[in-house]
Amino acid sequence: MVELRMVRPSGRLSEASDVKSRLLWIRLLIVLALPALGGCAQSLRNINAARDAFAVGDLARASETLRDVSEGRSRFADAASLDLAMVELAAGDAPAAEKRLRELRDRFDHLPEIAPVREAAAVATDDTARLFRPAGYEEVMIRAMLAICSLAHDQFDAESYTLQAMSKQAELARRAEERGISLESSAFQPIALAPYLRGVLREATHRDYDDAARAYQLVSAVQPQFAPAQEDIRRASVGTHSAPGHGVLYVIACVGRGPVLQEACLPTTTMSLQIASVVLNAATNEQEGEDRDVPTLPNIASVNVPQVVLPTSEVAALGVRVGGELHGATQTLTHVGELAQSQVEAEMPWTIARAVVRRAAKETTVATIGDAFGLEGDAGSLFHFAASSAWSGLEQADTRCWGLLPREIQVLRAELPAATHEIHLEPLGFAGQALSTGLSHQVEIVDGKNHYLVAIAPGTFVYLVR
């Protein structure tokens, strides 16, 4: 959820002292912002390079680069740490990835609702000065990926994580409804992955088939395109996990390059301007008293904001061969890219409003200084234009994000005789063609048990979590 707040220093200064203080702050912020922008730009370039390396199979370079950023003091450290968890999972170290994601989840959950110093800096500079807070869909996906990490090694906390993911998405939906955001779209509906994995785990007990059936019914409701859900419902309804002498293989595939944020110039809207006006009124009344003049909204046609984009990725699914025979292809449970796009779009009026409020604060400061110096007419207009343009020109959209999430999370269920099987995974293009030779793995199927095989395919290269 995007919070909009104005933070102002308390106390009253004389007009001359106030102007001098504002001038000093402007100079200081410009001096400090230039090297900070350079550092942020370098961190972003490093993260982008690591993401590209990950996509083509250069795990060592991706790990080294992301570790350097995550352990530094850059504002991109937490975003890099989220990406590093995906690298650890792809490298086969699911316990390390789970530990990292748990620590990040707990830290994000305990962030203060507002950090006054950072918020004040954000009003004076841009949103990159704020504490990094994951977007709503990222908070949900942290818990979903925790479940996948758990399935990849001990399965101990997997069901708990699925419940956390479902609870977090429900919380986002409640918050959105309270703010008047329409819930008709899929932006804040439950993600199918969480109830599906819960159904799988309930079914594996050979007792809780009713719970499993209800979970699969929710999957079918929120992801009707997932055809296997109907067979899952039927199977759970009759209380049969698998045929005698058989076990079940679940291939869980993280497919494609997922959503990232890039700076975009978007027009202001009536709704965003209304939100900005309400914020300015509330901030002025709270800080200065009811009779204080409210800063006038500047005439802004467009602002720079973060927008979701999906990097090009030619992989559509993973083909699964058992003993050399094609068993099928993974099918989409949750489209992470579409989830990110719909949630960020729903929040966009508030994101734009933040930029408008920030511009209003800067323009008010510049106008106050110009008036105090007695700058009127052309001289005053020139000063106002030059100062506010230079100050606002330092702004950058906050593009920090979890960039190594997959585009989609897909699954394939294969009921197989209890024995050792050679499982071959190959990335498939959108026309169904094999994009590379893929890789093989020996899997031991146990009678009446589940075996989970996690694969990550950002492109033609496939990582198998062994």
Image (cartoon, rainbow, N blue to C red):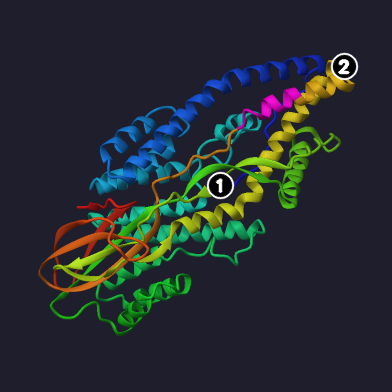
Q: Nearer the viewer, mark 2 or mark 1?
A: 1
Q: Position of residue 330 (x, y in %)?
A: 31, 66
- Magenta stretch in the rendered image: 386-395
Q: Position of residue 453 (x, y in %)?
A: 23, 60
The residue pinned by badge 1 equals 307
Q: Which mark, residue 113?
A: none
Q: Do callouts 2 and 1 mark residues in contact (Cβ within 8 Å)? A: no
Gap in angstroms between the C-alphas marked 2 and 1 = 41 Å
Name the residue rendered at 84%, 34% in the picture.
292
Tell whether 343 sits left or right of 4.
Answer: left
Residue lying furthest left: 419
- Say which of 96 and 319 sits in front: 319
Name the residue rendered at 24%, 75% in the picture.
206
Q: Is residue 1 above or below residue 118?
A: below
The residue pinned by badge 2 equals 374
- Label 2: how many Cα within 10 Å (few below 14, some 14–19, many 20+): few
Q: Residue 327: in sight, yes or no?
A: yes
Residue lying furthest right: 377
What kind of element bears circle 1? strand
Q: Position of residue 127 (x, y in %)?
A: 59, 36
